[in-house]
Each structure stands twice: as structure tokens, then as C-alpha cells.
Amino acid sequence: MVDRIVMDTKILAGKPIIKGTRISVEFILELLSSGMSIDEVIKEYPHLKKEDILAALDYAVSTLRHEEVYPTKQIL
């Protein structure tokens, strides 16, 4: 699924997008987090496929999985 996600510095400043579109992974996640279903996203953006939406979710999970967290001292 990751082959559906590309980055090109000439498109959206290099943000990850769905291949062949100008729709970013971030935008798809925003739509889903606002309460839209996968079917609703596809209805609104018919050039997207379910596999594109799932690839965006997979990309986000993969990115978070590899995120490094550095604990900081809490100030009370």
C-alpha cells in the first residue's frame, strides 16, 4: 500500500500525497477525524479508491510507530 503514497517537493511542499493526486495524507486523516467514513470520502473525492484511504492510514501508523519520544521534565 505504501506505493500509493509519494512525496514530491514540487507538490504541496513535499508532503506525502496519494500518487497521481494533490490530496495529502494529512487531508485524508483530517476528513476521517472529522467523522467522515471511508465511503463518504470516496463519494466526495471519487478519484480516490478505498486502497488510497487505507494507504494513508497505514502511512500514518507507520510514521507514528517510528516516532521517537523524548521525555521532558514537567514543571508544576
Image: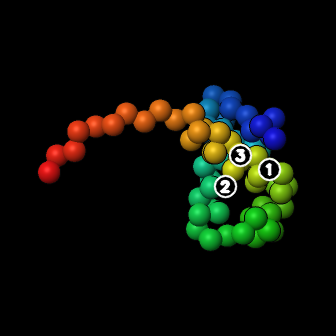
In primary-sequence order, the first of circles 3 and 1 is 1
- Label 2: which secondary element: helix
Residue topped by disc 1: 52
Q: Residue at x 23, y 39 (%)?
A: 73
Q: CA distance from mark 1 to mark 2?
A: 9 Å
Q: Nearer the viewer, mark 3 or mark 1?
A: 3
Residue topped by disc 3: 58
59 and 13: which is toward the camera: 59
- Label 3: which secondary element: helix
Q: Residue furthest left?
A: 76
Disc 2: CA contacts within 10 A as few (<14), some (14-19) or many (>=20): many
Q: CA distance from mark 3 to mark 1?
A: 10 Å
36 and 24: which is toward the camera: 36
Residue topped by disc 2: 28
Q: Are marks 3 and 2 in contact (CB under 8 Å)?
A: no
Quadrant containing the N terminus in the rendered view: top right
Q: Is residue 46 left or right of residue 28?
A: right
- The three-letter code of the residue at mark 3 reads Asp
Q: Residue at x 76, y 46 (%)?
A: 55
Q: Are marks 1 and 2 in contact (CB under 8 Å)?
A: yes
Tell me which colouring the rendered structure shows: rainbow
In primary-sequence order, the first of circles 3 and 2 is 2
